[in-house]
Image: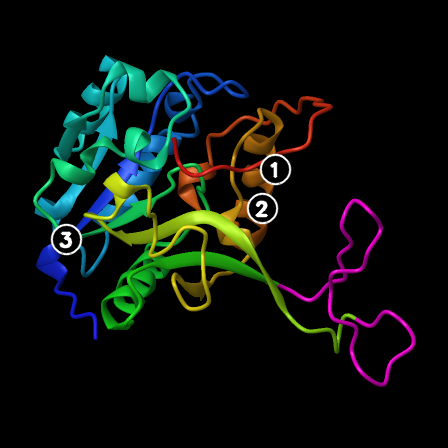
Amino acid sequence: MVNKSLKDICFIIQARLNSTRVPRKMIKPFSDTTLMGLGIQKVLDSKIIPKDNFYCSVYERELVELCEKYDVNVFHRSEKSANEEHTVSGMYEWSDKLPYKYVVLINACTPLLKTETIDKFVEAYINTESEGLFGVIGKKQYYWNKNGDLITKWPEGTTIMNTKVVETTYEAAHCLYASRMDTIKDEIWMGDTPFTKGNPELFEMEELEVFDIDYPWEFDVVYVLALTLNPTMQVWAKYNLSLRSHSQSPSFTMPE
């Protein structure tokens, strides 16, 4: 049985400015704040996360200064970590430098993520016996591989595609992650590599909450989504629409 105490868990937002798809997106003016600012404030608004256990892992001076403005702990990641692709241990340099047994990693590129969801994720991690926990989105859909082979289990007794009865599959949310710290040096992230059943455990999330900004036009999309969900949200009130065309499709990776 895995016994976890809140005092043994650190909470980390990791960010950099040299995103290849949207350079400097973490500090791009966004209403009265920034993606980074929104992410930090959500953690600070948590009812259960101890502020002393919260760190921002950043390299560039502008990000360091933003974190200091919010009076949060800063882990000074290396230039190499912020500018190159890495193994898990290389990207998450804090794993053998911070005095905690476990880590919850929060993606600040998901502006619709709710503080309440972060708290539920933390509670789920404390209470699970699994060493890892991973945010996912439930999908009732049919999928094929590149060879045209159906990889979705066809529902028994049906002859047409019916998403009401198809078995739910789960897509990586790339939003919330939890892992032991001491296994990262061995390239083991969230419990196992490659993942095995139950390790990490899956934490189902609402799809809108995990909307991940990877391209300029997605700032506009998230503004519309936010106003649709809550027309009185003041944080979006001063954001100016400037729709842009973009030919690329989004892709997702672990927080950089």
Q: Nearer the viewer, residue 178 or 50?
A: 178
Residue 222 in the image, given as x and y percentages of width and height: 55, 40
Q: Is residue 241 left or right of residue 130?
A: right
Quick one: label 2, few (<14), some, or many (20+) residues within 10 Å? some
Above-or-below relation of 70 to 79? below
Query: Considering the numbered disc 2 on the image, is that residue within a helix, a strand or a loop?
Result: helix
Q: Which quarter of the image is occupied by the C terminus?
A: top left
Q: Nearer the viewer, residue 42 or 153?
A: 153
The residue carrying mark 3 is 101
Query: Tag 1: residue type?
Result: Val
Q: Is residue 46 left or right of residue 142?
A: left
The residue carrying mark 2 is 225
Query: Tag 2: residue type?
Result: Leu
Above-or-below relation of 151 to 59? below
Residue 131 in the image, given as x and y percentages of width and height: 28, 62
Which of the 4 image quarters holds residue 82?
top left
Do the residues bearing badges 1 and 2 touch, measured as CB atoms within 8 Å? yes
Residue 199 in the image, given as x and y percentages of width and height: 38, 63
Which of the 4 image quarters holds residue 26?
top left
Closer to the camera: disc 1 or disc 3? 3
Q: Which quarter of the image is occupied by the N terminus?
A: bottom left
